[in-house]
Amino acid sequence: MVSDYIWDPLRKKSVRNTPEEQVRQWFISVLHEGMGVPEHMMGSEVALRHGAKEYRADIIVYDRSAKPVMVVECKRPEVTLDQEVVDQALRYNNELDVKYIVITNGGKTFIFERSGGGWAFMQKAPLWEEMVGLAGDDMTDRK
């Protein structure tokens, strides 16, 4: 029997067990177990404001100084990861100015790295230590 709630280790509480939440919790485990991101260096359902609009980023990964280095947009498994989903993550990035953007529906995951004035698709997920090392560099060419 599937429970109506699922534990979110980042929010430290049980949350509604929806298809999108299952993808979010799966990717939190990927970040933690596969990419070495400490749980205390992540946030889920993080409120952002862009002008008068308020958004919620699914997952944000932070460096040691609490600066965002990655934003993750999670979708239900049946949602196609198209330009609209990429654009949503890019809107969040307007406020966050991260080095990495991830979009996932649990079946497919795409990771992009800021490269020059644009974004480059990554073949392999970066480890947190790699993200943190890059986050500390002088990134004056990022804008």
Image (cartoon, rainbow, N blue to C red):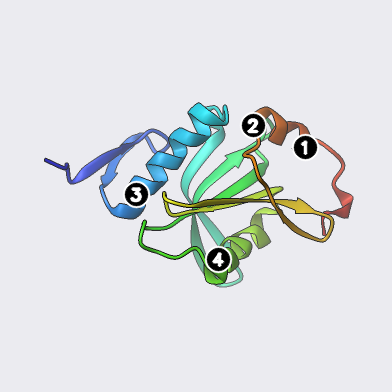
Quadrant of residue 62 in the image?
A: top right
Residue 124: image x %, image y %? 64, 40
Which is nearer the N-term, disc 3 or disc 4? 3
Amino acid at dot 2: Leu
Q: Quadrant of the C terminus?
A: bottom right
Q: Is residue 39 visible?
A: no
Amino acid at dot 3: Glu
Q: Residue furthest left?
A: 1
Q: Is residue 120 visible?
A: yes
Q: Which mark is residue 127?
A: 2
Residue designated by label 3 = 21
Q: Which mark is residue 23?
A: none
Relative side of 13 to 142, left or right: left
Which is nearer the N-term, disc 1 or disc 3? 3
Q: CA distance from mark 1 to mark 3?
A: 29 Å
Q: Residue sitting at 41 percent across and 46 percent down? A: 24
Q: CA distance from mark 4 to mark 2?
A: 24 Å
